[in-house]
Amino acid sequence: MKQIIHLVVNKEAIEIGVEPWWTLLDVLRDQLELTGAKKGCDRGDCGACTVLLDGRPVVSCTTLAVQSNGHSITTIEGLLSGSQPHPLQQAFVDYGAVQCGFCTPGMVMSAVALLDENPHPTENEVRAAIQGNLCRCTGYSKIVEAILSLAKA
């Protein structure tokens, strides 16, 4: 039996019926058609599905939708300002931190949470913040450089 939950997704109030076993990722992708968060490992190991829950990064594939009731969710789509990318999204492009792009939304969301909390992180703090996000294409150097470029700005 579906349960009604209330969310604020990308600054928009949402009321939706969910099954108790649906994950936040399922709701975002399948019900709300926000496909930026990727379904990678489906076990919380890869970070491709990272979104912000009340400003904190969470892996949405292991977060039940009902656990999100009453909370604010920000997805990669919510970072856009009209048609303008978020400065961190632009930095990923400028620094060549985007390879296949599968990990990029989760990586960006983890980095946004870091920079919101600590606008001037060290390289070690950046690496710690993205340690839950796996990338098979890069050596992480360009990703770290992109994030640090905003930390210096």
Image (cartoon, rainbow, N blue to C red):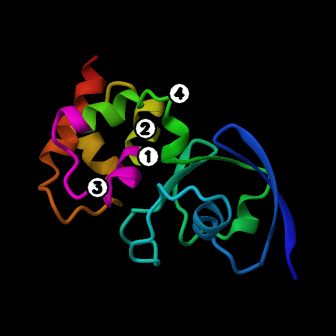
Q: Amino acid at mark 3?
A: Gly
Circle nearer the N terminus (3, 2): 3
Q: CA distance from mark 3 to mark 4?
A: 21 Å
Label 4 crowding class (10 Å Cα cut-off): few <14, some 14-19, many 20+? Answer: few
Label 1 crowding class (10 Å Cα cut-off): few <14, some 14-19, many 20+? Answer: many
Q: Could you tell me if the residues under marks 1 and 4 are in contact, i.e. CB atoms within 8 Å?
A: no
Q: Amino acid at mark 1?
A: Met
Q: Which mark is residue 101?
A: 3
Circle nearer the N terminus (3, 4): 4
Name the image quarter holding residue 26.
Answer: bottom right
Q: Which mark is residue 39?
A: none
Q: Which mark is residue 82?
A: 4
The correct choice, above or below, for 79 with respect to 35 in the image is above
Front-most of residues 93 and 6: 93
Q: CA distance from mark 1 to mark 4?
A: 18 Å
The magenta region covers 93-108
The location of residue 106, given as percent across then percent down, is: 40, 54
Q: Could you tell me if the residues under marks 3 and 2 are in contact, i.e. CB atoms within 8 Å?
A: no
- SS for callout 3: loop
Circle nearer the N terminus (1, 4): 4
Q: Could you tell me if the residues under marks 1 and 3 are in contact, i.e. CB atoms within 8 Å?
A: no
Q: Which mark is residue 112?
A: 2
